[in-house]
Image: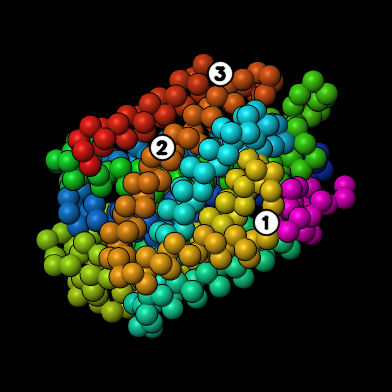
Amino acid sequence: MTERRTGTVPARARDDGAARPGRASLGRGLLPLLGPAFVAAIAYVDPGNVAANITSGARYGYLLVWVLVLANAMAVLVQYQSARLGIVTGRSLPELLGDRLPRGRRIAFWVQAEVVAAATDVAEVIGGAIALQLLFDLPLVVGGVIVGVVSLGLLTVQGRGQRRFEAAVVALLAVITVGFVTALFVSPPDAGGVLAGLVPRFAGTDSVLVAASMLGATVMPHAIYLHSALARDRHAPDGASAGPEATAADHRRTRRLLGATRWDVVGALVLAGAVNVALLLVAAANLQGADGTDTIAGAHAAIVDALGPTIGVVFAVGLLASGLASTSVGAYAGAVVMGGLLRVRVPLAARRIVTLVPALLLLAGGVEPTWALVLSQVVLSFGIAFALVPLLWLTGRRDVMGEFADGRWMRLGGWTCAVLIVGLNVALLVLGV
Protein backbone atom coordinates (compact mmCIF):
# COMPACT_ATOMS: atom_id res chain seq x y z
CA MET A 1 0.00 0.00 0.00
CA THR A 2 1.28 3.47 -0.78
CA GLU A 3 1.09 5.70 2.23
CA ARG A 4 -0.94 8.86 1.69
CA ARG A 5 0.86 11.64 3.55
CA THR A 6 -0.39 15.06 4.42
CA GLY A 7 0.90 18.05 6.34
CA THR A 8 -0.52 16.66 9.55
CA VAL A 9 -1.61 13.25 10.79
CA PRO A 10 -1.22 10.60 8.08
CA ALA A 11 -4.62 9.45 6.87
CA ARG A 12 -3.49 5.84 7.24
CA ALA A 13 -0.34 5.75 9.31
CA ARG A 14 1.97 2.77 8.87
CA ASP A 15 3.73 1.01 11.70
CA ASP A 16 7.35 1.71 10.82
CA GLY A 17 9.34 -1.46 11.02
CA ALA A 18 6.47 -3.37 12.63
CA ALA A 19 4.33 -6.12 11.24
CA ARG A 20 1.03 -5.07 9.80
CA PRO A 21 -1.92 -6.71 11.58
CA GLY A 22 -2.68 -9.27 8.91
CA ARG A 23 -3.09 -13.00 9.50
CA ALA A 24 0.64 -13.57 10.04
CA SER A 25 1.02 -10.93 12.73
CA LEU A 26 -2.18 -11.99 14.47
CA GLY A 27 -0.60 -15.36 15.12
CA ARG A 28 2.35 -13.83 16.96
CA GLY A 29 0.41 -13.18 20.15
CA LEU A 30 -1.35 -10.38 21.91
CA LEU A 31 1.52 -8.03 22.74
CA PRO A 32 2.18 -6.69 19.20
CA LEU A 33 -1.48 -5.62 18.98
CA LEU A 34 -1.41 -3.47 22.10
CA GLY A 35 -0.63 0.23 22.19
CA PRO A 36 -3.38 2.54 20.86
CA ALA A 37 -5.30 2.53 24.16
CA PHE A 38 -2.18 3.54 26.09
CA VAL A 39 -1.86 6.65 23.90
CA ALA A 40 -5.53 7.49 24.48
CA ALA A 41 -5.06 6.80 28.21
CA ILE A 42 -2.65 9.75 28.47
CA ALA A 43 -5.75 11.95 28.27
CA TYR A 44 -6.90 10.37 31.54
CA VAL A 45 -3.76 11.32 33.51
CA ASP A 46 -3.23 14.87 32.28
CA PRO A 47 -2.64 17.91 34.57
CA GLY A 48 -6.39 18.50 34.69
CA ASN A 49 -6.70 15.19 36.50
CA VAL A 50 -4.03 16.28 38.94
CA ALA A 51 -5.86 19.51 39.74
CA ALA A 52 -9.31 17.91 39.97
CA ASN A 53 -8.23 14.93 42.04
CA ILE A 54 -5.98 16.85 44.43
CA THR A 55 -8.74 19.43 44.90
CA SER A 56 -11.19 16.64 45.66
CA GLY A 57 -8.94 14.88 48.16
CA ALA A 58 -7.79 18.05 49.90
CA ARG A 59 -11.31 19.47 50.29
CA TYR A 60 -13.43 16.38 50.85
CA GLY A 61 -11.04 13.61 51.85
CA TYR A 62 -12.20 10.26 50.56
CA LEU A 63 -15.76 11.45 49.80
CA LEU A 64 -15.51 11.34 45.98
CA VAL A 65 -13.48 8.18 45.45
CA TRP A 66 -16.64 6.64 43.98
CA VAL A 67 -16.70 9.29 41.24
CA LEU A 68 -13.29 8.17 39.98
CA VAL A 69 -14.21 4.49 40.11
CA LEU A 70 -17.47 5.09 38.23
CA ALA A 71 -15.84 7.42 35.71
CA ASN A 72 -13.05 4.96 35.00
CA ALA A 73 -15.51 2.11 34.48
CA MET A 74 -17.41 4.29 32.01
CA ALA A 75 -14.14 5.24 30.31
CA VAL A 76 -13.30 1.58 29.67
CA LEU A 77 -16.61 1.07 27.88
CA VAL A 78 -16.42 4.34 25.96
CA GLN A 79 -12.84 3.89 24.76
CA TYR A 80 -13.52 0.33 23.69
CA GLN A 81 -16.48 1.54 21.66
CA SER A 82 -14.33 4.19 19.99
CA ALA A 83 -11.58 1.72 19.10
CA ARG A 84 -14.15 -0.79 17.88
CA LEU A 85 -15.65 1.79 15.54
CA GLY A 86 -12.25 2.49 13.99
CA ILE A 87 -11.36 -1.17 13.57
CA VAL A 88 -14.66 -2.29 12.07
CA THR A 89 -15.31 0.66 9.75
CA GLY A 90 -11.74 1.66 8.92
CA ARG A 91 -12.71 5.27 9.61
CA SER A 92 -12.50 7.60 12.60
CA LEU A 93 -15.48 9.02 14.47
CA PRO A 94 -14.93 12.55 13.05
CA GLU A 95 -14.71 11.14 9.51
CA LEU A 96 -17.97 9.24 9.90
CA LEU A 97 -19.69 12.30 11.32
CA GLY A 98 -18.26 14.47 8.56
CA ASP A 99 -19.80 12.15 5.98
CA ARG A 100 -23.25 12.30 7.58
CA LEU A 101 -23.69 15.90 8.73
CA PRO A 102 -24.73 18.71 6.38
CA ARG A 103 -22.20 21.50 6.02
CA GLY A 104 -23.74 23.91 8.56
CA ARG A 105 -24.10 21.29 11.29
CA ARG A 106 -20.68 19.89 10.52
CA ILE A 107 -19.07 23.31 11.05
CA ALA A 108 -21.08 23.91 14.23
CA PHE A 109 -20.03 20.52 15.55
CA TRP A 110 -16.41 21.33 14.75
CA VAL A 111 -16.66 24.66 16.61
CA GLN A 112 -17.76 23.00 19.84
CA ALA A 113 -15.06 20.35 19.41
CA GLU A 114 -12.46 23.10 19.02
CA VAL A 115 -13.68 24.80 22.21
CA VAL A 116 -13.18 21.49 24.00
CA ALA A 117 -9.74 21.13 22.40
CA ALA A 118 -8.80 24.62 23.63
CA ALA A 119 -9.94 23.73 27.16
CA THR A 120 -7.88 20.55 26.95
CA ASP A 121 -4.77 22.42 25.90
CA VAL A 122 -5.23 24.98 28.67
CA ALA A 123 -5.07 22.21 31.24
CA GLU A 124 -2.11 20.45 29.68
CA VAL A 125 0.09 23.45 28.97
CA ILE A 126 -0.61 25.11 32.31
CA GLY A 127 0.14 21.86 34.12
CA GLY A 128 3.48 21.50 32.37
CA ALA A 129 4.31 25.17 33.07
CA ILE A 130 3.54 24.71 36.78
CA ALA A 131 5.84 21.66 36.85
CA LEU A 132 8.71 23.63 35.29
CA GLN A 133 8.17 26.40 37.79
CA LEU A 134 8.26 23.91 40.67
CA LEU A 135 11.40 22.23 39.34
CA PHE A 136 13.39 25.19 37.97
CA ASP A 137 11.57 28.31 39.20
CA LEU A 138 10.77 29.37 35.63
CA PRO A 139 8.06 31.97 34.93
CA LEU A 140 4.80 30.31 33.96
CA VAL A 141 4.72 31.88 30.48
CA VAL A 142 8.25 30.70 29.73
CA GLY A 143 7.33 27.24 30.97
CA GLY A 144 4.25 27.22 28.75
CA VAL A 145 6.35 28.05 25.69
CA ILE A 146 8.82 25.28 26.55
CA VAL A 147 5.99 22.77 26.94
CA GLY A 148 4.62 23.78 23.54
CA VAL A 149 8.01 23.43 21.82
CA VAL A 150 8.84 20.06 23.40
CA SER A 151 5.36 18.71 22.63
CA LEU A 152 5.87 19.66 18.99
CA GLY A 153 9.07 17.65 19.04
CA LEU A 154 7.13 14.66 20.34
CA LEU A 155 4.64 15.07 17.52
CA THR A 156 7.43 14.75 14.95
CA VAL A 157 7.98 11.22 16.28
CA GLN A 158 4.43 10.39 15.14
CA GLY A 159 5.39 11.25 11.57
CA ARG A 160 8.01 8.50 11.70
CA GLY A 161 5.54 5.78 12.55
CA GLN A 162 2.72 5.15 15.00
CA ARG A 163 4.66 2.52 16.93
CA ARG A 164 7.43 4.98 17.71
CA PHE A 165 4.94 7.56 18.90
CA GLU A 166 3.22 4.94 21.05
CA ALA A 167 6.58 3.95 22.57
CA ALA A 168 7.42 7.56 23.43
CA VAL A 169 4.01 8.13 25.02
CA VAL A 170 4.12 4.88 27.00
CA ALA A 171 7.56 5.86 28.34
CA LEU A 172 6.11 9.15 29.57
CA LEU A 173 3.13 7.26 31.01
CA ALA A 174 5.58 5.19 33.06
CA VAL A 175 7.17 8.38 34.41
CA ILE A 176 3.73 9.77 35.24
CA THR A 177 2.79 6.61 37.12
CA VAL A 178 5.96 6.64 39.23
CA GLY A 179 5.65 10.37 39.86
CA PHE A 180 2.09 10.25 41.13
CA VAL A 181 1.96 6.86 42.86
CA THR A 182 5.22 6.91 44.84
CA ALA A 183 3.79 9.11 47.60
CA LEU A 184 1.02 6.57 48.16
CA PHE A 185 3.57 4.01 49.39
CA VAL A 186 5.34 6.53 51.60
CA SER A 187 2.09 7.54 53.32
CA PRO A 188 -0.66 4.91 52.84
CA PRO A 189 -4.30 6.04 53.04
CA ASP A 190 -6.82 5.01 55.66
CA ALA A 191 -8.48 1.79 54.45
CA GLY A 192 -11.77 2.58 56.18
CA GLY A 193 -11.89 6.02 54.60
CA VAL A 194 -11.28 4.55 51.16
CA LEU A 195 -14.12 2.05 51.60
CA ALA A 196 -16.45 4.80 52.82
CA GLY A 197 -15.53 6.85 49.76
CA LEU A 198 -16.96 4.15 47.51
CA VAL A 199 -20.49 5.02 48.68
CA PRO A 200 -22.05 7.51 46.20
CA ARG A 201 -22.89 10.85 47.84
CA PHE A 202 -22.14 14.58 47.69
CA ALA A 203 -21.55 17.30 50.27
CA GLY A 204 -23.13 20.40 48.78
CA THR A 205 -23.05 22.24 45.47
CA ASP A 206 -19.30 22.75 45.42
CA SER A 207 -18.68 19.01 45.68
CA VAL A 208 -20.89 18.52 42.61
CA LEU A 209 -18.73 21.02 40.71
CA VAL A 210 -15.57 19.19 41.76
CA ALA A 211 -17.16 15.86 40.78
CA ALA A 212 -18.01 17.28 37.36
CA SER A 213 -14.41 18.42 36.91
CA MET A 214 -13.24 14.93 37.88
CA LEU A 215 -15.61 13.41 35.36
CA GLY A 216 -14.50 15.84 32.66
CA ALA A 217 -10.88 14.97 33.43
CA THR A 218 -11.56 11.22 33.31
CA VAL A 219 -13.92 10.68 30.38
CA MET A 220 -12.20 12.97 27.87
CA PRO A 221 -14.01 14.05 24.67
CA HIS A 222 -10.85 14.34 22.57
CA ALA A 223 -9.79 10.84 23.63
CA ILE A 224 -13.09 9.51 22.26
CA TYR A 225 -12.41 11.12 18.88
CA LEU A 226 -8.76 10.11 18.85
CA HIS A 227 -8.99 6.45 19.82
CA SER A 228 -11.04 5.57 16.74
CA ALA A 229 -8.27 7.03 14.56
CA LEU A 230 -5.48 5.32 16.51
CA ALA A 231 -7.17 1.92 16.22
CA ARG A 232 -7.96 2.53 12.55
CA ASP A 233 -4.38 3.44 11.69
CA ARG A 234 -2.92 0.50 13.58
CA HIS A 235 -5.40 -2.24 12.74
CA ALA A 236 -7.48 -1.21 9.71
CA PRO A 237 -5.21 0.97 7.52
CA ASP A 238 -6.73 -0.33 4.30
CA GLY A 239 -10.35 0.43 5.16
CA ALA A 240 -13.33 -1.38 6.66
CA SER A 241 -12.79 -4.74 8.31
CA ALA A 242 -16.44 -5.66 8.07
CA GLY A 243 -18.99 -4.80 5.41
CA PRO A 244 -20.73 -6.18 2.34
CA GLU A 245 -17.38 -6.90 0.68
CA ALA A 246 -15.76 -8.48 3.76
CA THR A 247 -14.89 -12.17 3.67
CA ALA A 248 -15.20 -14.75 6.41
CA ALA A 249 -11.45 -14.41 6.99
CA ASP A 250 -11.90 -10.64 7.41
CA HIS A 251 -14.55 -11.25 10.06
CA ARG A 252 -12.33 -13.71 11.92
CA ARG A 253 -9.49 -11.19 11.83
CA THR A 254 -11.79 -8.44 13.13
CA ARG A 255 -12.95 -10.60 16.03
CA ARG A 256 -9.35 -11.31 16.97
CA LEU A 257 -8.47 -7.62 16.81
CA LEU A 258 -11.47 -6.70 18.95
CA GLY A 259 -10.42 -9.29 21.52
CA ALA A 260 -6.92 -7.79 21.66
CA THR A 261 -8.41 -4.30 21.86
CA ARG A 262 -10.41 -5.25 24.95
CA TRP A 263 -7.17 -6.21 26.71
CA ASP A 264 -5.51 -3.03 25.44
CA VAL A 265 -8.29 -0.78 26.74
CA VAL A 266 -8.72 -2.53 30.09
CA GLY A 267 -4.99 -2.59 30.78
CA ALA A 268 -4.43 1.04 29.81
CA LEU A 269 -7.40 2.46 31.68
CA VAL A 270 -6.93 0.36 34.81
CA LEU A 271 -3.44 1.85 34.98
CA ALA A 272 -4.76 5.38 34.36
CA GLY A 273 -7.55 4.85 36.89
CA ALA A 274 -5.08 3.65 39.51
CA VAL A 275 -3.00 6.81 39.01
CA ASN A 276 -6.09 9.00 39.40
CA VAL A 277 -7.23 7.24 42.55
CA ALA A 278 -3.69 7.45 43.93
CA LEU A 279 -3.69 11.23 43.44
CA LEU A 280 -6.94 11.61 45.36
CA LEU A 281 -5.80 9.27 48.14
CA VAL A 282 -2.47 11.06 48.57
CA ALA A 283 -4.32 14.37 48.90
CA ALA A 284 -6.91 12.90 51.28
CA ALA A 285 -4.26 11.29 53.49
CA ASN A 286 -1.77 14.17 53.57
CA LEU A 287 -3.33 17.44 52.41
CA GLN A 288 -6.79 17.62 53.96
CA GLY A 289 -6.98 20.76 56.07
CA ALA A 290 -3.51 21.93 55.04
CA ASP A 291 -3.15 25.55 53.99
CA GLY A 292 -2.84 26.37 50.27
CA THR A 293 -3.86 23.01 48.92
CA ASP A 294 -6.42 24.58 46.58
CA THR A 295 -3.54 25.08 44.12
CA ILE A 296 -1.09 22.58 42.64
CA ALA A 297 1.84 24.69 43.85
CA GLY A 298 0.36 24.74 47.35
CA ALA A 299 -0.32 21.02 47.20
CA HIS A 300 3.27 20.44 46.13
CA ALA A 301 4.51 22.49 49.07
CA ALA A 302 2.27 20.50 51.42
CA ILE A 303 3.56 17.24 49.95
CA VAL A 304 7.14 18.39 50.53
CA ASP A 305 6.30 19.33 54.14
CA ALA A 306 4.51 16.05 54.79
CA LEU A 307 6.61 13.58 52.80
CA GLY A 308 9.93 15.29 52.13
CA PRO A 309 11.62 17.08 49.20
CA THR A 310 12.43 13.88 47.29
CA ILE A 311 8.76 12.99 46.96
CA GLY A 312 8.10 16.60 45.97
CA VAL A 313 10.59 16.36 43.10
CA VAL A 314 9.20 13.00 41.97
CA PHE A 315 5.69 14.49 41.97
CA ALA A 316 6.80 17.52 39.93
CA VAL A 317 8.58 15.31 37.39
CA GLY A 318 5.40 13.26 37.01
CA LEU A 319 3.42 16.46 36.47
CA LEU A 320 5.88 17.62 33.79
CA ALA A 321 5.69 14.27 31.98
CA SER A 322 1.91 14.50 32.19
CA GLY A 323 1.85 17.94 30.61
CA LEU A 324 4.26 17.04 27.80
CA ALA A 325 2.57 13.78 26.86
CA SER A 326 -1.01 14.98 27.14
CA THR A 327 -0.53 18.17 25.15
CA SER A 328 1.09 16.16 22.32
CA VAL A 329 -1.79 13.69 22.30
CA GLY A 330 -4.28 16.57 22.48
CA ALA A 331 -2.77 18.26 19.42
CA TYR A 332 -2.90 14.92 17.58
CA ALA A 333 -6.58 14.58 18.51
CA GLY A 334 -7.33 18.11 17.32
CA ALA A 335 -5.83 17.33 13.94
CA VAL A 336 -7.95 14.17 13.70
CA VAL A 337 -11.11 16.18 14.49
CA MET A 338 -10.32 18.93 12.01
CA GLY A 339 -9.40 16.49 9.25
CA GLY A 340 -12.53 14.42 9.72
CA LEU A 341 -15.09 17.20 10.10
CA LEU A 342 -13.70 19.94 7.87
CA ARG A 343 -11.69 17.70 5.53
CA VAL A 344 -8.88 20.20 6.02
CA ARG A 345 -5.41 19.16 7.07
CA VAL A 346 -3.07 21.74 8.51
CA PRO A 347 0.54 21.24 9.57
CA LEU A 348 0.80 20.04 13.15
CA ALA A 349 3.20 22.89 13.88
CA ALA A 350 0.54 25.45 12.92
CA ARG A 351 -2.12 23.68 14.93
CA ARG A 352 0.21 23.39 17.91
CA ILE A 353 0.82 27.16 17.87
CA VAL A 354 -2.87 28.08 17.52
CA THR A 355 -4.04 25.88 20.40
CA LEU A 356 -1.12 27.03 22.55
CA VAL A 357 -2.14 30.69 22.42
CA PRO A 358 -5.17 30.56 24.81
CA ALA A 359 -3.14 28.85 27.52
CA LEU A 360 -0.28 31.33 27.20
CA LEU A 361 -2.71 34.28 27.33
CA LEU A 362 -4.21 32.93 30.55
CA LEU A 363 -0.76 32.49 32.06
CA ALA A 364 0.30 35.98 30.99
CA GLY A 365 -2.94 37.45 32.36
CA GLY A 366 -2.22 36.20 35.85
CA VAL A 367 -5.18 33.80 36.10
CA GLU A 368 -4.74 31.41 39.03
CA PRO A 369 -3.50 28.32 37.15
CA THR A 370 -5.01 25.56 39.27
CA TRP A 371 -8.49 27.14 39.16
CA ALA A 372 -8.14 27.46 35.38
CA LEU A 373 -7.29 23.76 35.28
CA VAL A 374 -10.37 22.77 37.28
CA LEU A 375 -12.71 24.95 35.21
CA SER A 376 -11.23 23.56 31.99
CA GLN A 377 -12.27 20.11 33.16
CA VAL A 378 -15.84 21.32 33.68
CA VAL A 379 -15.85 22.52 30.04
CA LEU A 380 -14.65 19.08 29.01
CA SER A 381 -17.46 17.51 31.01
CA PHE A 382 -20.02 19.42 28.94
CA GLY A 383 -18.27 18.35 25.73
CA ILE A 384 -18.49 14.64 26.50
CA ALA A 385 -22.07 14.24 25.28
CA PHE A 386 -21.21 15.70 21.86
CA ALA A 387 -18.63 12.96 21.38
CA LEU A 388 -20.34 10.11 23.23
CA VAL A 389 -23.87 10.29 21.80
CA PRO A 390 -22.75 10.16 18.12
CA LEU A 391 -20.33 7.34 18.99
CA LEU A 392 -23.10 5.21 20.52
CA TRP A 393 -25.44 6.07 17.66
CA LEU A 394 -22.90 4.83 15.11
CA THR A 395 -21.79 1.68 16.94
CA GLY A 396 -25.44 0.65 17.31
CA ARG A 397 -26.16 0.88 13.55
CA ARG A 398 -25.94 -2.30 11.51
CA ASP A 399 -25.49 -0.32 8.29
CA VAL A 400 -22.27 1.05 9.85
CA MET A 401 -20.98 -1.88 11.93
CA GLY A 402 -22.58 -4.86 10.20
CA GLU A 403 -22.61 -7.94 12.42
CA PHE A 404 -20.42 -6.05 14.92
CA ALA A 405 -23.15 -3.56 15.80
CA ASP A 406 -23.86 -3.21 19.54
CA GLY A 407 -25.78 -5.99 21.17
CA ARG A 408 -28.43 -5.42 23.81
CA TRP A 409 -26.09 -5.29 26.81
CA MET A 410 -23.49 -3.15 25.11
CA ARG A 411 -26.19 -0.72 24.00
CA LEU A 412 -27.68 -0.62 27.50
CA GLY A 413 -24.30 0.00 29.13
CA GLY A 414 -23.32 2.70 26.66
CA TRP A 415 -26.53 4.67 26.88
CA THR A 416 -26.60 4.32 30.67
CA CYS A 417 -23.17 6.00 30.73
CA ALA A 418 -24.45 8.75 28.46
CA VAL A 419 -27.49 9.39 30.65
CA LEU A 420 -25.36 9.55 33.81
CA ILE A 421 -22.91 11.99 32.24
CA VAL A 422 -25.56 14.26 30.76
CA GLY A 423 -27.57 14.06 33.98
CA LEU A 424 -24.65 15.34 36.04
CA ASN A 425 -24.23 18.27 33.66
CA VAL A 426 -27.94 19.12 33.92
CA ALA A 427 -27.60 18.99 37.71
CA LEU A 428 -24.80 21.55 37.46
CA LEU A 429 -27.05 23.88 35.48
CA VAL A 430 -30.00 23.45 37.85
CA LEU A 431 -27.79 24.13 40.86
CA GLY A 432 -26.56 27.31 39.17
CA VAL A 433 -22.91 26.28 39.22
Q: What's the amino acid at mark 1? A: Val
**Is label 3 or label 1 in front?**
1
Per the image, the residue denoted by label 2 is: 73
Q: Is residue 242 left or right of residue 82?
A: right
* Mark sitting on residue 346: 1
Q: Is residue 310 left or right of residue 90?
A: left
Determine contact: label 2, label 3, CB under 8 Å: no
Give the mark nearest the N terminus, 3 or 1.
1
Can residue 87 be seen in this snapshot?
A: no
- Chief secondary structure of the magenta span? loop
Quarter occupied by the C terminus: top left
Whether residue 15 appears in magenta in the rendering, the answer is yes
C-alpha gap between disc 2 and disc 1: 35 Å
* Mark sitting on residue 7: none
Q: Is residue 13 left or right of residue 300?
A: right
Examine the image and state in which quarter residue 360 appears.
Answer: bottom left
Dot 2: what SS? helix
Q: Residues within 10 Å of mark 3 (few under 14, many from 20)?
A: few
Give the mark nearest the N terminus, 2 or 1.
2
Can residue 151 be seen in this snapshot?
A: yes
Per the image, the residue denoted by label 3 is: 407
Residue drawn 37% across and 69% down? 363
Magenta stretch bounds? 1-20
Residue drawn 23% across and 32% down? 430
